[in-house]
Structure formats: C-alpha cells, structure tokens
Amino acid sequence: MDNIYSVSQVNAYIKSMFSEDFMLNRIKVRGEASNVKYHSSGHIYFTIKDSGGTLSAVMFASQRRGLSFQLREGLKIVVTGSIEVYEKAGTYQIYATRIEEEGKGDLYEAYLKLKSRLEEMGMFSAEYKVPIPAYASVVGIVTAPTGAAIRDIMNISARRDPYVQLVLCPALVQGEGAPESIVRAIRRLDSYGTDVMIVGRGGGSIEDLWAFNDERVARAIFDCHTPVISAVGHETDFTIADFVADLRAPTPSAAAELAVMDYGQFRSDISAVRETLSRDMREKTGACREKIRQAALRLRIQSPGSILRELRSGLEEKRTAMTVAERTRITDRKNRFLLEKERLKSLSPLNRLKGGFAYVTDGNGKAVKGTEKISARDELTLRFSDGHIRTSVLEVTKDDKKGSID
C-alpha cells in the first residue's frame, strides 16, 4: 500500500533537505531587484529576477547592517544568504544577510583592505590633522572645471565672503588617469601656497568616486602642507580621501561653508567686540578717574599744607580761646580789684576823718589809742581830712566802762 503524507510532513521534509544542503546555506545570487517593500517592522521584502525566473527574498531588520545603500526597483544586485523553506506556505526564499550592488563587491573589498592598511599606518590619526584656518583669504580647489561641485563652491563662497580668492586647479575626478590628475593638482596648489584646499567632486556611484579611494591620492593629501577639506560625493558617501584629509565635508557646498568665513557675521562679530571694548574702556576709564579723584582727595587731606592749615586753625582756635580766657580773667580780677578798692576805701581812715573823726598822735608821732598814756600838758597832733592841729592836753578824764559812750 502506498504511503500517504500530510502537507506539513512534505514541507518539513523538503525543509530538512534544504537545510542539509551546504550550498544553499551559504549562497550568492545575482539578479535584478523588483517588488521592493520596506515594511514598518524594518524588514525588507523583495524579489530577485533575471530573464529566466524569479526568487523571493527577505532581509530581516536584524540583518540591515549588511545593506549600505537604498534598495530600489531595477537595481542589479548580488544577494548573500541562505535559501530555506517557509513550511506554512510551502514556498522557499532566500534570507539575505548582505546585499551589494553588482560589480561593487570586489571594489568594496578593495576599499576595506586599503582603509585598514592605511589606518594601521597611522594616516588617519588625529595627531596629523591640521586645523582649518578661520579666516582664509585664498582657497584652493581641486575638482573638475565644469559641473555642480565647482558651481556650488563658487556660489557659496561669493555669498559668504565676496573678497575671498578662489584658485581652481582642474583635475579629472573619475575614469582612467583621474588619480594621477588629482595628485598633480594637489601638489601644484600646495606649492602655490593657498590658505586651505578643497579636494572633491559631486556624488556618484562607487565607480565614479573610486579615484578618491586610490592610495596615491591618499598619500598626496597626507603629505600636503596646506590644510585639506575633502568633499567627495554626498553625505552618505565615504572615501579614503575623507579619512586622510584634515576635515571631511559631506558635500562640496558644505566644504565651501567650512573653508570660507562668513564675512557678514565676521563684521557683526567685530562690531560686537568693538562695542564690548568701548564699553569696557569707558567703565575702566571711569573707574580710574574715580580712583584718581579719591586719591587726590586723600592727598589733599593728608598733604603737609593741609595738615599745617589744620594745625594753624587749631592754634588760632586755641589763641582765640586763650585771649578770651585772658580777657575774662583780667576782667574778673579787675572787678575783684574794684571790689577790694571799694572795701579798702570804706575802711580808709581818710573816709572816717571826713565823717568828723580825727587821727591823734603824740609828740613822738605815735598814734594815741586811749587815755592810758596821756597826761595833762602833753602835746598832741589832731589830723583831719583837710589838715592838722597841734594842741596841749588840759585834763585827762577816764571812763569807767571801756568802749561805751554815755
């Protein structure tokens, strides 16, 4: 009796046959891409076809690092991967791990080998990079004399700095003889003495840009004394020249932006700096003037003349105070003198004599103070305020009570 198998068993069997085939596990398929669909999950679904048939293909999001360009319809490609069976649908397809444009695989391998070798030699090291001058007045350009690259550089340069001088040394930028032409142009401009050099061209395929992956061009850029900006292709294109150059620009237009200063911004910056300096100078001058004013004030206050004037003023005040005190003291003593004078005058015998009293002296001129030593016939002198009288005592009568008058 014939064996009967389910669909799942058949598909599983076929899948096991595919998985055991060594060639299908690691295979490269050449063809034309069609039905390309980028899924929201990140997977890429497409078909590889040639004149004799088609092959379904998928590249999962986890393998996208194996794709360095945008996959599009009609592109000639070489797909590396494994061919496996999708059991549920009973179909087979290639699961891509790498996709290359046809004819570029070998070039890319050569590019990677040269890049690795030059990097090991230190030609990409930052220590050999020369700074790009901020204010270049002469800019050298190595590119084709016609094309978008030179027009873009000229337009950007004229807009940024109308006074910058552009020196074009034309060169072949693709095809046979392009590397030698680029090398000669670089060396010629380096000997000319430009401030900075732009080496590049517009975008293109890897074959179009291959001259800038040449070791001779890389060494010419590395040996160049003039700072070099590489500007090869579009932003996503990288060449050996980009790694050797002192600075990489994503496009020729961007290279002009980096090489040529913005004159309008430069003038604005100068004006801002001038205003800042003027303001700082005014503030500094004002501060210095204030310090000088205060120093002059302190000098006037502490100068010998000022000190002498202050001492003179103090002496004048003291002299005035002494004069006032002296006058006060003289006036006080004068008043005291007058008081004493009046008092003495009141006690003066002359005043008493004027009141009807007389000053009595004996013959010897001694004052007679009582009757004790007076006898009859003694001569006495009586002095009055207006003269004196000489007289003789007739009789002496003594009172019983001394000092009393009956």
Image (cartoon, grey):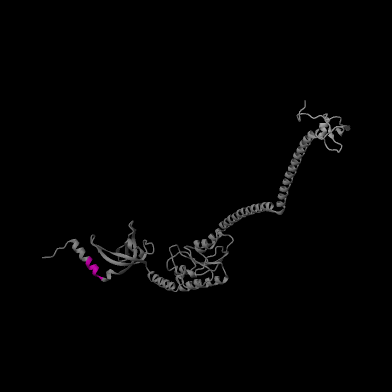
Relative image position of residue 323 (x, y in whole percent): 75, 44
Relative image position of residue 186 (x, y in whole percent): 52, 71
Q: Quadrant of residue 49?
A: bottom left
Quadrant assignment for the C terminus: top right
Identify the magenta region: 15-21
Can residue 174 be seen? no
Residue 306 vs residue 74, the one in the foreground: 306
Check residue 16 for magenta coloring.
yes
Check residue 293 for magenta coloring.
no
Q: In this view, does 174 lie to the left or right of 356?
A: left
Can residue 105 be seen? yes
Q: Which residue is drawn at 51% across and 62% down?
A: 258
Residue, far left: 1
Q: Is residue 195 left or right of residue 17?
A: right
Q: Is residue 322 left or right of residue 257?
A: right
Q: Residue at x 25, y 70 (%)?
A: 21
Q: Residue at x 49, y 61 (%)?
A: 254
SS assignment for the magenta stretch, majority: helix
Relative image position of residue 263 (x, y in whole percent): 57, 58
402 to 155, vertically: above or below: above
Relative image position of residue 22 (x, y in whole percent): 26, 71
380 to 235, vertically: above or below: above
Quadrant assignment for the N terminus: bottom left
Residue 203 vs residue 54, the one in the foreground: 203
Q: In which quarter of the image is residue 209?
A: bottom left
Residue 339 vs residue 276, the one in the foreground: 339
Tally of numbered discs: 0
